[in-house]
Amino acid sequence: MLKTKIQDNDGSDTGVIIYCAIILFLTGVFLSFVWVNRKYRPLRAKTIKLCTLMYLATIPWALGDFQMNGLVSIKGGWAHCRFWVVWMRILFSFLYSTLVTLRFYALDRIFIQGKPYKGRALYVPAVSLFIVLLGYCLTCQFINVYHISYYFKYASICVVDDRYRYVSVGLIWIPWCGVLFFAFRIRSIQSSFNELYESLFTCVLGFLILIKTTVVHATHPYYLFAKGFRHSETIIDVTATNLIIWIMLGYPAYQCLFNRENYDREWAKKLRTDGYASKYSAEFDSTPNETTSYSRMNDSMFEHNKMGTKDFYDKDPLDTIRMLSANGGGTLTSNTIPSPNSVYRPPLSNLDFGSMNDGSLDSFDNSMDGRTDFRRII
């Protein structure tokens, strides 16, 4: 029955634990940076709270891996097998998987279904999944310990019942199939919120964990006695789960650090072009019920005058001229900028843009007859 050579704990197991601790620490530092810059709009749109909950779930999951994969001596507190197997490894691996599913579901509901992700839409799926997870773990807690996991002192291991092993491995496929389903649905989201590559990498890493776990538990139920198996099981779990978080938040975090203003401006323009400005303001803005829904979203695109109204001062003067010229030189309306209710007036209301054809700086200067320096307007 046991075909694996027994290899006791040594320094290599400690090295794997140190490696996992470093990965978790670096991800914690990364998320701290993200939270410090959480008002940065491209980051705010990446569901930081869900990603943080995913990270918090990886910590007890890793501790459960240390115990169940045999990286620590199974004695003392580590010998409480059912606690570590059920309440640490199984519960938090399921929780992590459902959080990934909920994140993709949120994008699907907002941008594919066109519905808000608030109220019942937010809490009912989350609470329902949590109740299912809690019910499963409570069931495992109160049934006979020999049907779940128990300590076998002569070998100093936690023996896991085969039926429990197969049921648990089978159940964790369900949320990841949900991830694959929603990842397929959100592939058509436009550029400002498109997560095609992020979703592909997430699915690849998630199913890597699933396939690895399924194959190892089916073919080598006593893999914890072999260094190669127990090390690879733990390293893949910790690395893949943390890498998914880096993939989801990494690009906007990099831009926030090295190209903050330019990327923010480009991202806002894509948002308007894709027609997602109102969705961003409603779903991700901390004060979505303001009279002007773009007040926070367009802080870098507009400036307030003393009367409290908004004059259009785009960072790119050519964009300002093109938009005014396209509207006939009167006022900026929803035909030229994506605001269904607000009306904007240009900085100089007596200018005639009707004769401008190409919206260039030269044509603008000619229309002014030398009376006003355009650069003073900007």
Image (tube, rainbow, N blue to C red):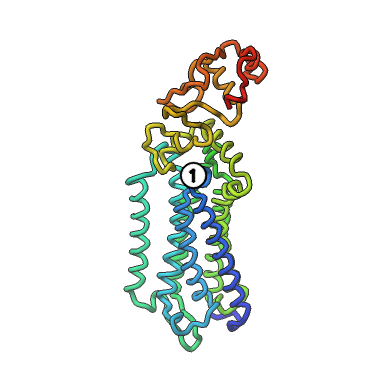
List the single residue furthest toward the top: 355
Amino acid type shown at disc 1 = Ala
Q: Position of residue 162 (x, y in %)?
A: 45, 73
Q: Nearer the viewer, residue 171 or 251?
A: 251
Can residue 238 be seen from the camera position used here?
no
The residue identified by callout 1 is 45
Q: In this view, does 34 lie above or below 10?
A: above
Q: In this view, does 308 lie above or below 110?
A: above
Q: Where is residue 272 in the image (x, y as percent from the top left)?
A: 52, 32
Q: Which of 152 and 277 is in front in this view?
A: 277
Residue 363's quadrant in the figure? top right
- Picture residue at 52% right of the left edge, 53% below the top: 34
The crowd level at tag 1 (other Cα within 10 Å; few <14, some 14-19, many 20+) is some
Residue 371 appears left or right of 183: right
Q: Is residue 246 above or below residue 369?
A: below
The N terminus sits in image quarter:
bottom right
- Picture residue at 42% right of the left edge, 41% below the top: 283
Could you tell me which secondary element the residue under label 1 belongs to?
Answer: loop
